[in-house]
Amino acid sequence: MELRVEGVEKGFPGTSGDAGRLILGGVSFAAPDGGIVCVLGPSGCGKTTLLRIIAGLERADRGRVTIGDRVVSGTMREIGYITQETTLLPWRTVLSNVELGLEFAGVSPAQRRATARRCLELVELAGFDGYHLKQISGGMKQKVALARALAVEPRVLLMDEPFAALDAQTRNALQEVLLHVLERTRTTVVFVTHNVDEAVFLGDRVVCMTAQPTRVGKSVEVRVPRPRDRTGPELNALRKELLAFLAEQRLNSRTAPVEADLQPPGAAAGSPGTLPNEARAK
């Protein structure tokens, strides 16, 4: 199912008399049905805030998010969300962790158990049903989180740096598992990462964000067929292009004027009205 992000703006009010800050300054992109869009950007530019808005966990000040013909106005079962921290429950087994969303949805024990086992097999964890989290590795925990998200059959899956804490070998292996899973499920994915190699290997499109206020600064289609050679010349050329853009954004963020320089003439720091109009909540 196609996901569209259209002109999303989000500002946060200041504290202790400080002017507010515009975080997302009009973000727009589309993730086609069954496609993977990877989102890159400078640290702190608002990528997680953007995912939370797409998930319906936060409201945008302006703009909208749609899935198919539906506007996202709150949490939806069609949207799955995987964070860097797996948020698995240590007192539950691998199988019962995967069953959790189905349990909340009122699915019968027999049906949710069968679905959970099918999802564990899909992520290459068949046979680990009765294990507890202390008995499995970090990479396996991320597989459990992926299986749990897939169990409720989301149409859109949001992934916020899910492999960032893993070593390079485990990370590469999990990328392969994810691609295998998505080939089977045809789930639409928005994947946030700081890793350019990961973005060009996984993505059908890579969207690069600017420094705050964050907008889409570069959007490139990855026209390399799968399976992809991580060291191939096409991916290397794309990697070089994206790294150059991100380096430029880091430079811009260091040389940006301080907040006081951005206020209208005659406005004292922290005075009423210094929050940009586009950042004020409706």
Image: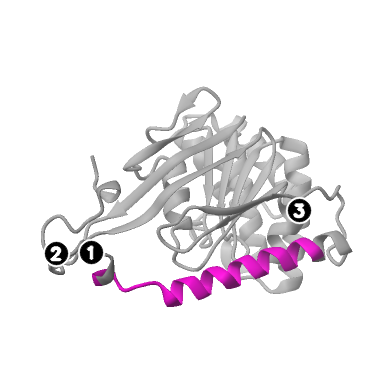
Residue drawn at x 79%, y 47% is: 180
**Are dots 1 and 2 in contact, CB under 8 Å?**
yes
User: In the drawing, does residue 110 fall left or right of residue 233?
Assistant: left
**Would you call the spot at circle 3 few (<14 residues within 10 Å), some (14-19), or many (20 or more)?**
some
From the image, tell me which residue sits under label 1.
Answer: 263
Q: Nearer the viewer, residue 8 or 146?
A: 8
Residue drawn at x 74%, y 65% is: 239
C-alpha distance separating marks 2 and 3: 55 Å
Q: Is residue 152 magenta?
A: no
Residue 254 in which image quadrant: bottom left
**Would you call the spot at circle 1 few (<14 residues within 10 Å), some (14-19), or many (20 or more)?**
some
Q: Which residues are magenta?
A: 237-260
Q: How is the image coloured?
A: one colour
From the image, tell me which residue sits under label 2.
Answer: 267
Residue drawn at x 18%, y 67% is: 18
Identify the element where label 1 is drawn: loop
Q: Nearer the viewer, residue 115 or 93?
A: 115
Could you tell me the amino acid type at mark 1? Gln
Could you tell me the amino acid type at mark 3? Val
From the image, tell me which residue sits under label 3.
Answer: 177
Residue drawn at x 52%, y 67% is: 42
The prevailing secondary structure element of the residues shown in magenta is helix
- Tell me which numbered mark, 1 or 3, is placed earlier along the sequence: 3
Residue 185 picture location, percent across and down: 72, 36
- Residue 141 visible in the snapshot: yes
Residue closest to the far front: 265
